[in-house]
Amino acid sequence: MLSQARSKYDDDRLKFLAWPAEARPLEDAGADLVFMSMVDHHLAAPDKAAREIHRVLRPGAHAFIRNTVSDEISSYPYLKFFPSIRAIIAHSLHSRAEQDARHTAAGFHRTARQTDWHEMAANWQDFATKMALRADSFVARLDN
């Protein structure tokens, strides 16, 4: 993903870094934006990551955290095909309330929340093709 981002944006003002969310190699108040997409449920120490994100942001800067939540498990379209995935998802995801509490404790105040729904595939055949790739981290944990 980093190489794709770097190839799309040739701008000296942008830096794309890959480091653990719990230990960012940035100075205090050194970032204008933290953008995390579908990462929260992979963090080993989400509370520590939230504090670290807050530490590296300049006053008035923003954190944009895009992730699914346990409150929406029933919306996963593959539940009816892979019933055992429900437990994997429930164990991995945090609720909105848990995320809010974590970020509030780290010093954030939420300015917005939005739920976006997107189509994963145009039809069931396309969906099956995508699921066979195991690009979804929950599907990847299913046994054959």
Image (cartoon, rainbow, N blue to C red):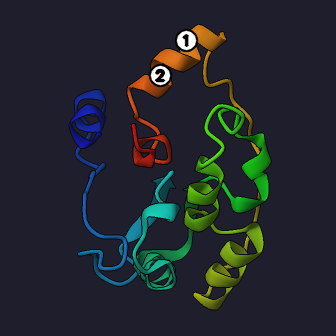
Mark number for residue 126?
Answer: 1
Question: For the residue marked with disc 1, what is the amino acid?
Answer: Asp
* Residue 108 in which image quadrant: bottom right
| Residue where numbered disc 2 is placed | 130
* Residue drawn at point x = 40 percent, y = 34 percent: 134
Q: Is label 2 in contact with label 1 (beta carbons under 8 Å)?
A: yes
Bin the neighbour count of mark 1 within 10 Å (Cα to Cα): few under 14, some 14-19, many 20 and up.
Answer: few
Where is residue 65 shown, x and y percent of the image? 57, 59
Picture layout, residue 82 above or below residue 8: below
Mark 2 residue crowding within 10 angstroms, few (<14) / some (14–19) / many (20+): some
Q: The C terminus is located in which quarter?
A: top left
Q: Hey, which residue is sitting farthest front in the picture? A: 144
47 relative position to 67: left or right:
left
On the image, the x and y values in percent for residue 136 come to 47, 39
Question: 33 left or right of 66?
Answer: left
80 shown above or below 86: above
Foreground: 37 or 31? 37
Q: Residue 94 at what x, y percent from top left?
A: 64, 68
* Front one among 21 and 108: 21
The answer to whether residue 111 is visible is: yes
Q: Is residue 66 visible?
A: no
90 and 27: which is toward the camera: 90
Q: Indicate whether 104 appears above or below 20.
A: below
Q: Give whichever of 89, 56 is nearer the camera.
A: 89
Alpha carbon distance from label 2 to label 1 = 6 Å
The amino acid type of the residue labelled 2 equals: Lys
Label 2 SS: helix
Q: Helix, strand or loop at disc 1? A: helix
Image coordinates for residue 46, horizontal then vertical, percent: 49, 77
